[in-house]
Image (cartoon, rainbow, N blue to C red):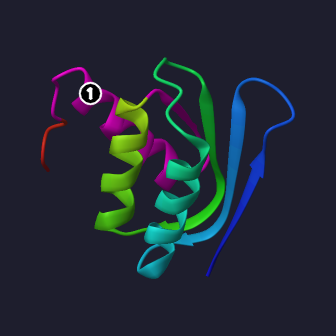
Amino acid sequence: MLKITVEKTGRPVRVKLDGSLSGPWVAELEKSWVGLGSGGRKGWLVVDLIDVTHVDAQGRELLRRMHRGGAELIGCGLMTREIIQQIQLASQGCEPEKS
């Protein structure tokens, strides 16, 4: 289950996620993202991952695409910080070392 809350009251637009970004919920987030339109610039959208409990491979790929589309990803748990760091490194052309 994933709760998606979109706050359009200011700039940037904020999308807050709560729960598991996996399975059919990935498509729901993508629909929400597409519905917001493309900001076309860095920082037009903030994706709040603070309350995300799980992200599957499809969820990670969607977050990568959102980041490439200008979204800023924020999170504070170990899992979400690791995912954000991997996405940021990949966008810079750096791949993290595999252990």
Front-most of 3 and 85? 3
Front-most of 78 and 9? 9
* Whether residue 89 is situated above or below residue 54 in the rendered picture: above
Q: Residue at x 49, y 33 (%)?
A: 38
Which quarter of the figure is the N terminus placed in?
Answer: bottom right
Q: Residue at x 12, y 47 (%)?
A: 98
Percent coordinates x, y for residue 69 in the rendering: 40, 32
Front-most of 21 and 34? 34
What amino acid does circle 1 point to? Ser
| Residue 75 appears in the rendering | no
Percent coordinates x, y for residue 23 in the rendering: 41, 80
Is 64 situated left or right of 2 in this image? left
* In magenta stretch: residue 92: yes
User: Which stretch is magenta?
Assistant: 70-95
- Residue at the disc numbered 1: 91
* In magenta stretch: residue 26: no
